[in-house]
Amino acid sequence: MKSFKFNIRGNDYEVEVIRLDGSKAEVEVNGTTYQVEIEKKKSETKTPILVRSAVVKPEGSHEIARNETVRNPVHQVRSPLPGVIIQLFVKEGDKLKRGDKILVYEAMKMENNLVTEKDGTVKTLKVKLGDNVLQGDVILEME
């Protein structure tokens, strides 16, 4: 079957496993045949189990907190992408309804329309034709 060479305390041993049957084996050591029993030790390798404590949610955490005392009547319309303003459809004082077109800007070689998300009146217009805007720049303020 298999041959092994051992050196134990300076002595060389040639061991050949002739037959292996369950827990018994027949081996030949330096030409002498022996019947041996194989002792199998159980290795106790345990996979660790992750135990997490339960998450405690504070009361009312599923509700959105609204602060009614501090209301900002001014709504800022911001640029969603960096680009160049190529057309304006509003001016200060204009009344807008949700979905009205505010401007057209060029971003990534495409023309994009910017529309309002809510009703209101244009308080201040922060851009003009040809302006470069970055993502998040305020384009106009509405009341």
Image: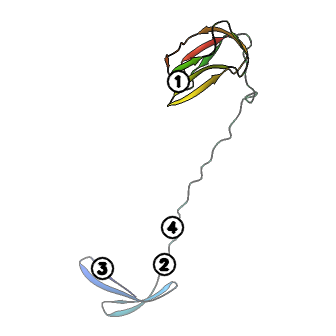
Q: Marks 2/3: CA distance?
A: 19 Å
Residue at left 73%, top 10%? 69
* Residue corresponding to mark 2: 39
Q: Quadrant of the C terminus?
A: top right
* Residue corresponding to mark 1: 135
For the question of whether residue 143 can be seen, the reply is no
Mark identifier at residue 6: 3
| Residue placed most toward the observer, 64 or 20 | 64
Q: Earlier in the sequence, mark 2 or mark 3?
A: 3
Residue at left 23%, top 77%? 10
Q: Earlier in the sequence, mark 4 or mark 1?
A: 4
* In front: label 2 or label 3: 3
Residue type of the residue flagged with mark 2: Glu
Mark identifier at residue 127: none
Q: Residue 24's x, y, as percent?
A: 49, 87
Q: Earlier in the sequence, mark 2 or mark 1?
A: 2
In this picture, is 141 found above or below 136? above
* In front: label 1 or label 3: 1
Q: Quadrant of residue 71?
A: top right
Q: Earlier in the sequence, mark 3 or mark 4?
A: 3
